[in-house]
Image (cartoon, rainbow, N blue to C red):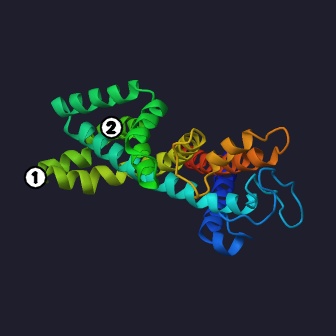
Amino acid sequence: MKSRRINRLEAIGALMVAVLLIVAIFAPQIAPHDPSRAVAATFGDPGAPSLAFPLGTDQLGRDVLSRIIYGARISLIVGVAAMALTMAIGVTIGLASGFFGGSIDFMLMRFTDVMLSLPFLLLAMALVAVLRPSLITILFVIGIVSWTQVARVVRAETLSISERDFVFAAKALGAPARRLIVRHVLPNVLPIIVVMAALGTSGTLLLEAALSFLGLGVPPPAPSWGRMVAEGTMYFRTAPWLATSAGLAIFYAVLGFNLLGYGALQRRAR
């Protein structure tokens, strides 16, 4: 029964992520309106949900549903691309630290400890403020502040795998370090890397939303869920659908990746 529940959670998470991907890819075909153009005469006064605008319109007359749909693109681009950079940095440092050990391990782990001691949100805010907000800046900043946990987990897995008989046998046959890492260590670390990538993507989505909420995310007119929440808070009493709809979109995306990663992690643990 427990196994069925885990498989069900993973399947639900995969389905939710698949729906999110479809919405992001086919946003021009799905969205009823242009997300950056005013389509209703409600300037300065958000429009209530109606048949023409199921989620209403914002204070500039833009369709909220269309902005939510196009916002999925920004969130997925940032979430997946930033996580790819995060994994690249974390896996490289973790593999090098766990495989070579000694002074290399000491220096890399002390550097990781220093990064862990810094509040990652404040560090991200400072870097974005210095580099100026843009899509590339957000990807870069999230990637360089989110790799520490990945490096620690990969290091621990690498230490364990490096002590196994097949690695010692390859060393005895004269295999160079690069071949040992690529052919023997990395394939055995790959499952935990995939799981951490799924779980970590939800974290990058939240960090992007937080930066956008603070005005440090992807600049307008690109629709961003975090900025939509920030803009909607000004009208929360009179137009709660503005902030609520964007907040639910963030919740949906984070929940989908968390369920996918949690199910994969529990399946691997069995």
> Which residue in the rendered view is the most extreme toward the left?
174
Give how far apart the Cα atoms at labels 1 and 2 are.
Answer: 23 Å
Mark 2 Cα shell of 10 Å, populated few (<14), some (14-19), many (≥20) = many
The quarter holding residue 64 reads bottom right
Three-letter amino acid code at the position of disc 2: Arg
The residue to which callout 1 is attached is 174
- Given residues 75 and 12, the one toward you in this image is 75
Q: What element carries label 2?
A: helix
Which residue does the image show at 58% across and 42% down from the upper left?
206
Which residue does the image show at 19% across and 56% down from the upper left?
179
Residue 85, position as x, y percentages in the image: 38, 51
Which residue does the image show at 52% across and 46% down from the upper left?
217
Three-letter amino acid code at the position of disc 1: Gly
Please indicate, yes or no, whether residue 146 appears anywhere in the rendered image: no
Residue 191, position as x, y percentages in the image: 44, 51
Mark identifier at residue 155: 2
Position of the C terminus, as image quadrant, is: top right
